[in-house]
Image: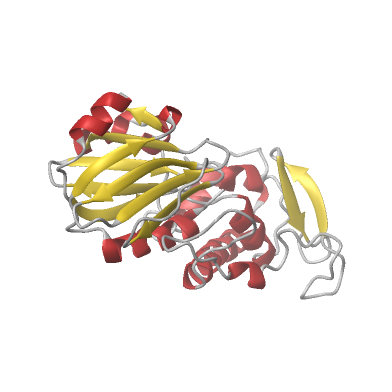
């Protein structure tokens, strides 16, 4: 599933090409992708709207339009947004096509069909349940060691489960939680409340560092992820534990192990992480 670095990379790519473009046609090939409003209203009323800017909140992409409305897109597991200055060949996984007045095109492709698109007034974004309850952004002033200490103090669940909870912090997913915990030398099964202030500070730094490095590498491509031009990410070359089970730890040489934590495959070094 695309996480914060991947969605931010897509946002930056679309920010370069979409603002100022006017939608001239919308073709919905799979109605299940459109969650709000009805497909008929979506295709009839969206043409004529002009893109103002591109935003992001957690893993949600936001395309702001000129009538105080917004397209909110959650890519889920396999969703992709590909922009092209000229029409591309479409296939069975192309579910929504936005054509602009200059004949450039934005394609929403989704193999698993879990991705969702909403179009609604900006002031009603709170109606999207997952978006409304998001915690602070990792790079925001609200997310800091003090915030972590306050929120983790009474958490008996595992630290990995807390970090995956979008109400605690927005945008983290399985890849970057594993990578951050490794850098902070914290075992993913540790009770969140057991972390010391020093460990929480180390984890905070690790989260920010790994996310920034992944953004700099334009995201991680393990299978489906592509940026807004269809290009692969590059952070997969720098992963230290994720999907490296059985391989030597890059720090101590001990074999990386894989276990299940919070229902997710979890990679860690049993020697480095305590």
Q: Is residue 201 left or right of residue 38?
A: right
Q: Is residue 196 left or right of residue 252?
A: left
Depth check, front residue: 142 or 251: 251
Depth check, front residue: 19 or 30: 30
Residue 29 drawn above or below residue 23: above
Q: Residue at x 26, y 33 (%)?
A: 43
Q: Is residue 217 left or right of residue 253?
A: left
Residue 245 lies, in percent from the top left, at 82, 59
Q: Is residue 188 left or right of residue 31?
A: right
What color scheme is it?
A: secondary structure
Does any portion of residue 252 appear in the rendered image? yes
Q: Residue at x 18, y 52 (%)?
A: 101
Q: Residue at x 43, y 34 (%)?
A: 130
Residue 189 lies, in percent from the top left, at 74, 47
Depth check, front residue: 274 or 175: 175
Residue 96 drawn above or below residue 267: above
Residue 174 lies, in percent from the top left, at 63, 50
Q: Quadrant of the C terminus?
A: bottom right
Residue 143 lies, in percent from the top left, at 42, 55
């Amino acid at each position: 599933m695309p996480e914060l670095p991947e969605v931010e990379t897509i946002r930056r790519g679309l920010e370069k090409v979409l603002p100022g473009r006017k939608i001239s046609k919308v073709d919905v090939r799979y109605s299940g992708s459109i969650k709000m409003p009805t497909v008929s209203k979506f295709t009839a009323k969206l043409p004529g709207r002009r893109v103002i800017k591109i935003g992001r909140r957690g893993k949600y992409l936001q395309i702001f339009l000129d009538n105080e409305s917004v397209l909110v897109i959650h890519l889920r597991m396999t969703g992709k947004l590909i922009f092209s200055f000229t029409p591309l060949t479409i296939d069975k996984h192309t579910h929504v096509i936005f054509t602009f007045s200059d004949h450039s095109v934005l394609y929403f492709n989704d193999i698993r069909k879990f991705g969702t698109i909403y179009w609604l007034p900006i002031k009603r974004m709170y109606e999207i349940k997952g978006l409304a309850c998001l915690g602070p952004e990792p790079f925001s002033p609200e997310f800091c060691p003090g915030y972590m200490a306050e929120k983790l103090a009474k958490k008996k669940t595992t630290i990995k489960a807390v970090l995956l909870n979008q109400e605690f912090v927005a945008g983290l997913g399985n890849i970057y939680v594993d990578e951050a915990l490794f850098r902070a030398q914290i075992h993913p099964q540790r009770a969140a409340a057991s972390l010391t202030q020093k460990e929480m500070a180390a984890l905070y730094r690790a989260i920010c560092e790994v996310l920034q490095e992944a953004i700099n590498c334009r995201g991680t491509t393990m299978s489906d992820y592509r940026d807004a031009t269809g290009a692969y990410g590059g952070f997969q070359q720098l992963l230290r534990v994720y999907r490296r089970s059985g391989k030597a730890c890059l720090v101590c040489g001990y074999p990386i192990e894989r276990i299940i934590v919070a229902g997710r495959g979890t990679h860690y070094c049993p020697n480095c992480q305590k």
